[in-house]
Amino acid sequence: MQKTTLTRLAALIAMGTLSLSPTREAALIFSSPAAPGATRVFGVEKTGSEIKFQVKSRLKVIEGVFEDWKAQVNLDPTRLEALQLGVQAQSASIKTGNLLEETLIRGENFFAAEKHPEVSVASKKISTEGAGRFRMDAELTLRGTTHPVVIPFALELNGEHEGQMRGEFEFSRKDFGMTYNMTLNPIEDLVKVIVTLKVHEQGQEPKEPSPSKQ
């Protein structure tokens, strides 16, 4: 009897360990409306997801992406106002397709990647604006400084097993100590950030695209 009890206890502990182990991709947790108290785990898929920024200069629009990042999203479809989002991106992973631009942006005058390797966004409050649109009050931490930002975003669930979040916001680079400018090619103060997160329920087969009609 004691042996049977110990065996069952070991099995429960093993199941708990598996459920708490982090996956290679960030996880999105859904409370299942069909089974109260149950959870459904969604992964943030890197393919189809992107963290991008844009800033205008006199000569061009500089666009870049963060190649190294992670995200965490907690979401209950029955209480969307309780959504929580956290994003962390590595400053040194910035890519623009131009080596001189990348060196300048990662350097001390802008992101200061060596001293401040991480840029993060953390949600604080979500407000529903209707028709799948929301307002997120969040905090942006950059170069060791934190300021509030407002992020309008859209949330679209494609059936039961996948969906997409897309939001964008602007911040003043000077608020974070990025006051450097170039005489011949001055850079505007406002920087736009666009975040797209594609999610898919773990353990479910991806939806096959509809065959095109000939």
Image: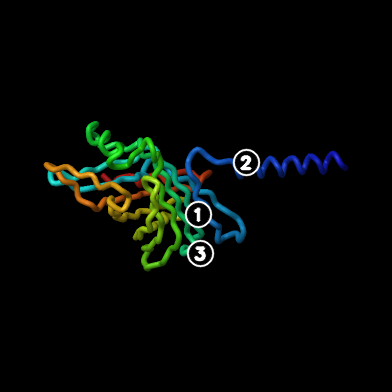
Q: Secondary structure at mark 3?
A: loop
* Residue nearest the viewer, comparing 207 with 196: 196
Distance between mark 1 and mark 3 Cα atoms: 12 Å
When the figure is inspected, residue 113 is found, relative to residue 144, above or below; the finding is above
Secondary structure beneath dot 2 equals: helix
Q: Quadrant of residue 12?
A: top right
Outermost residue, top side: 99
> Which residue has dot 3 on it?
78
Q: Which residue is mark 1?
A: 74
On the question of residue 52 being in view, the answer is yes
- In three-dimensional space, the C-alpha distance between marks 1 and 2, rounded to whole angstroms, equals 19 Å
Q: Residue furthest right?
A: 1
Q: CA distance from mark 2 to mark 3?
A: 26 Å
Along the viewing direction, whichever of 55 and 49 lies nearer the viewer: 55
Up the image or down, 77 lies above or below 107; here it is below
**Residue depicted at x 60% and y 59%:** 35
Name the amino acid, label 1. Answer: Asn
**Amino acid carrying mark 3 in the image:** Thr
**Residue 20, image quadrant:** top right
Marks 1, 2: nearer the viewer: 1
- Residue 31 in the image: state x and y as whole percent: 55, 57
The secondary structure type at the circle numbered 1 is strand
Residue 174 in percent (x, y) is at 27, 51
Q: Residues within 10 Å of mark 1 (few under 14, many from 20)?
A: some
Amino acid type, mark 2: Leu
State which quarter of the image contains the N terminus.
top right
Q: Which mark is residue 18?
A: 2
Give x and y (percent) for residue 130.
37, 68
Query: Does 183 sit left or right of 77 as displayed?
Result: left
Residue 25 shown left or right of residue 187 in the figure: right
Q: Quadrant of the C terminus?
A: top left
Q: Mark 3 Cα within 10 Å, few/some/many (few <14, many 20+)?
A: few
